[in-house]
Structures are given as C-alpha cells and as structure tokens.
Image (cartoon, rainbow, N blue to C red):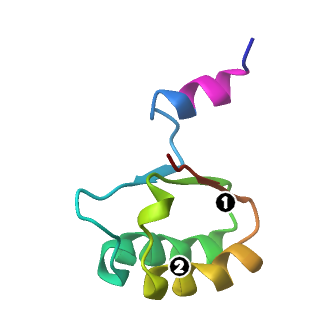
Amino acid sequence: KRCSICRQIEQHQFYALMVTSTTKSSYSRNELDALYAKIIIARSQQEPFFCIITQAEKLSDASANSLLKLLEEPPIGWHWILLTD
C-alpha cells in the first residue's frame, strides 16, 4: 500500500517533481542547470518539491561537489532521491 503522493511520484505525475537522468557516461554540471534554476525559484516560494537523480553513480566529481551544498542545506520542503545501480 502506498499513499497517493508516492504513487504519483512513481508514475512521474506529481506536480512538483523533477527527474534528472543522463545518457552519457557521467553527468556534467551543465546537465544539472535546470535543477539549479528550479532551486532558485523554490528558495523564494518554499514549496514542497521532489527531486530524483537517476544513475547517481554517474555524477562526476564536479557535479557531485556542486550538489553537496544543496544536499546539506536543501530548500525548505525539498526531498531528494538518488537512485543508483
């Protein structure tokens, strides 16, 4: 049994959800620009938001380091899910 929000997230239908993935061998900082742009807006709105980063093992050192600060001090209401093989 799952709550309705969990089902919406699993089906990528939740209104405040961003799923990030890459087809390359590793993420670059540029591939995460849309995420950073959303965070700037979210910090002022303080809205709930779910961010899923698939293939987290593909985060390059530069992209992982840029995410570190966000993971340590996320905007209010943000939830992070990092998926890996």
Q: Position of residue 63 (x, y in %)?
A: 45, 81
Give the x, y percent position of residue 5. Answer: 66, 30
Label 2: which secondary element: helix
The three-letter amino acid code for the residue at tag 2 is: Ala
> Which quadrant of the view contains residue 28?
bottom left
Q: Please tell me whether residue 5 is drawn above or below residue 80 in the rendered image.
A: above
Q: Is residue 60 above or below residue 20?
A: below
Quarter of the image that includes the N terminus? top right
What predominant SS class does the magenta segment belong to? helix
Q: Look at the numbered disc 1 and give the secondary structure of its residue.
A: loop
**Residue 55 placement (x, y as % from top left):** 44, 54
Q: Going by the image, does 34 lie left or right of 65?
A: left
Q: Looking at this view, is 73 or 28 the one in front?
A: 28
Q: Nearer the viewer, residue 11 or 37?
A: 11
Q: Is residue 73 visible?
A: no
Residue at position x 41%, y 65% from top? 58
Q: Please state which amino acid type lies under the numbered disc 1.
A: Glu
Q: Is residue 51 above or below residue 9?
A: below
Please provide the residue range marked out in magenta.
3-8
| x and y, in percent, of residue 50 in the image | 60, 51
Q: Mark number for residue 47?
A: 1
Residue lying at 73% horizontally and 21% vertically, measured from the top left: 3
**Left or right side of 78 for 40:** left
Residue at image position (30%, 59%) is 22
**Residue 6 falls left or right of residue 9:** right
Residue that numbered label 2 is attached to = 64
Give whichever of discs 2 and 1 has the lower sequence position: 1
